[in-house]
Image: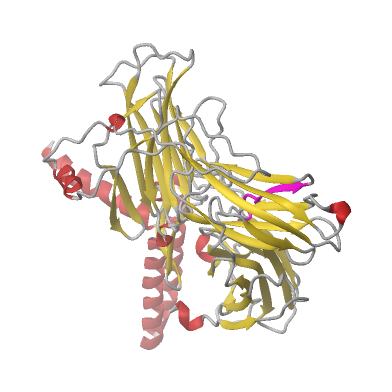
Amino acid sequence: MEACFLRRLLFVVLTAGGTLADDGQVTFVSELLSKPAQKLSKYGWYANVRLQRFHMPEETAIARWLFSVKKGHTFHCGQHNVTIHIRWGAPPVINPTGSVFPNSTLWSPSLSLTLPVTSQSVTTFNLSDPAAGDWYVAAHLPEDDGRIEQKGFPSCSYFFQPQLSIRRAVDMPVLQPDAFLTQTAAPDGPARLKLYVPEFASSLSVSVADCSSGEAAENENCSLVLRLGCASLQLDPVRVNCSGIRCSASLPNPPWNTWLRVVVESSQANRTVTFKVVSNYTVGCKPKSVGLEADDDFAKLRGNSSPANPVSNISVVSDTVTVSNHSLAQVSQRPVSACVGTVPVLFEELDVLSLRFTPVSGPNISITNTHPMLLSYPLHTHASGGTLNLQLTLNSTNATVSNSSNVVACFSPWTPVLELNHSQRCRTALFGGFSIGVNVSAPKAVVRLPFPQSTTWYLTLQLTCNSGDCGNTSVVSVVPEVFLSACVEDCGPYGECRLLRSYSYLYAACVCTAGWKGWGCTDDSSAQSYAHQITAILLLTLSNLFFLPAIVVAVRRSYLTEASIYLFTMFFSTVKHTITFVRLCISAVLTFHLFSLVLPRL
């Protein structure tokens, strides 16, 4: 259905120079994506947000959004502010009302733009080297003031339409490991390259050398700016200003199984620099190969074979690609002492926005202090509309755990953190992670991530001790539970989880009742008491009794049609007011039936 509303124009730009973002070394094409205009609503909960999804192709050099807001009527409505949120990888998590989030719920604010609107407003947002994948745009009016609008009368309505224009390179050079490429960077045309980062790459380095600008005084001087990575609005690419005869940029823990963007631009005006660029990566450690016998995995699922201890599935492998050119220093090899063990995880799709991940070797995972244990959890695009839950429990029944022992964990997207200690932060080169820990005093830890990014998430676990020596406690057992749910704890007792749709994309949000609010309906700052709800029900119900005098008068004067209308209006109004508090009514009815069943038996 989304393709029916999507207009895409594609034409090849073959100019040699002078155009925007055209450096003469690669060919750029232009693509235009547009979504239909939608009527905006005042924010009450997430269903009032107009969510649009755009797919950003690989090798996009420049992206430009055009946001148009137009008033639907000609009469004066005053000035209103339209808020626009932009996020890469998942829908934006927003909090316009400033409500309290549920416990252990972590989220990062997205980019927000405020567009004042009187009759019609247009604004643009430019982004260089955006990350490939899905981008989400959400828009809404200010918070709902609670005023009732009469049906049939014209009201102030606003329509929002986003459009996206991109410039994409179709022949971007690929930077192979240990292979030099000669490139040219001009002030108005940077050199654009890409390289592939394989799985279990622990570090990555890109170096430039042999610079020449055509002037003898400036030869061998690399006046360049080297950037690694793409713009995701949360973290910027790694940027290095080069000024000597050589320059390099390194990334510890680069993103796995993805293409990484490399942009080299001249830092001096009116000067074109020719240079050589090379890349290399290091694989510090990877687990032992499991072979090609897939029947063993099914046997483990059936319980017909005892799985091997995941701690023993360790193999130290060092595979370092170095630079052989004399003008560049070789990249130092990582120490082989750091290693990692892996545990295969079973992926089960239970329902819409309902996934469960289970370790194949059983719920208990053995953790040591010598090396970390790694578990991976892939999330596809349609899983980003739910809530990713992680619960880590320390199992102290199988082993004696000392008070100085701690199990630290890092939950990160795209790539794991393979070295966990007190000084190492839970973040990678381009993305941040979420750090948790369990011990004897706090044996359970929970992390909830609403609208997680659609990528592979990694959980790294390791045992640490305050004194450095764990003594007899060298192995502990933990139970990691990772699952995807539609909402946070099913919105609790004062909310209901609703499934929402934006064309073919599904996502979920909570609608709260009885004055409760917040992402999980846990904010009771404006909640109504039980007595207040009962009083409201009684007043709304008894107010319908005022129809009785009109019904009696109509019957006595033989106005049967009018009497029937009054009677039906009174009846359905009473039903409507009752089901407004359906949760409270059902609870009261169930309590009444319980007493009616129990009391006769006493």
Q: Quadrant of residue 139?
A: bottom right
Question: Horizontally, is 537 left or right of 429 in the view?
Answer: left
Residue 107, how many percent across, how many down? 54, 46
Q: Residue at x 20, y 46 (%)?
A: 297
Does the stretch in magenta take in 235? yes
Q: Which residue sits furthest front?
A: 326
Toward the viewer: 229 or 279? Answer: 279
- Seen in the picture, residue 134 relative to 110 is either above or below; the reply is below
Q: How many marks?
A: 0
Question: Horizontally, is 480 left or right of 406 in the view?
Answer: left
Residue 185, how many percent across, how many down? 74, 61
Q: Residue at x 58, y 71 (%)?
A: 171
Q: Which residues are magenta?
A: 231-242
- Quadrant location of the C terminus in the rendered image: top left
Q: Residue at x 51, y 82 (%)?
A: 5
Question: Horizontally, is 359 left or right of 57 in the view?
Answer: left
Residue 519, how many percent across, how many down? 50, 50
Q: Quadrant of residue 574?
A: bottom left
